[in-house]
Amino acid sequence: MTRSSDFPPSFRHVKLLLAREKENPSGQAGTGYDLLVPLDRQGRIELSEWKAHQLLCRVRRFATGDEDQVGRLRRKPGGQWYFDYAAGESDDDIAFRFDDERFVPGEYVSLAHGGRSHTYQVARVEKP
């Protein structure tokens, strides 16, 4: 088990919750992601820290009524970020523009899950 003292100082726990969309006009607090990622002072993913500590960069996808999926934050050679779960490529979630996104409360990020794009709001950012 990893203790909070095992993480480099730049690491943050980020909670993303499904934002309002046509099918969910109020959003959905029971659906989202928990991330453990290194962030710089502006709230962007710190690439050099990610490279040095890839095994610590984790993700948990959760949805009410579904089993949680746990994986890792990965990056394809062309720079596309994605969440890699154990079952192979078919279950991977694709992140859009994660190099440019700011992970600060109130901001929005886009992810594709199950072939559909969804918007998530950054609900919380804190030390692990």
Image (tube, rainbow, N blue to C red):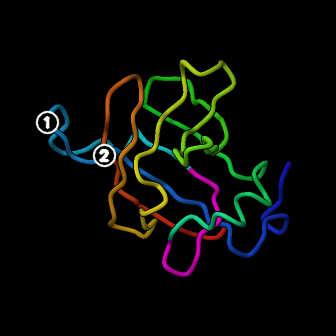
Disc number at residue 119? 2
- Kindly state the secondary structure of the residue where label 2 is placed: strand
Verify whether residue 19 appears in magenta. no
First to last magenta residue range: 35-43
Percent across and percent down for residue 38 are: 65, 65
Residue located 32% across and 58% down the image: 108
The answer to whether residue 41 is above or below residue 54 is below
Residue located 44% across and 32% down the image: 63
Q: Mark 1 sits on what residue?
A: 22
Q: Residue furthest bottom?
A: 41
Dot 1: few (<14), some (14–19), or many (≥20) neighbours within 10 Å?
few
- How many numbered dots are placed on residues in this image? 2
Quarter assignment of residue 75: top right
Percent across and percent down for residue 10 are: 68, 73
Quarter assignment of residue 9: bottom right
Image quadrant for the C terminus?
A: bottom right
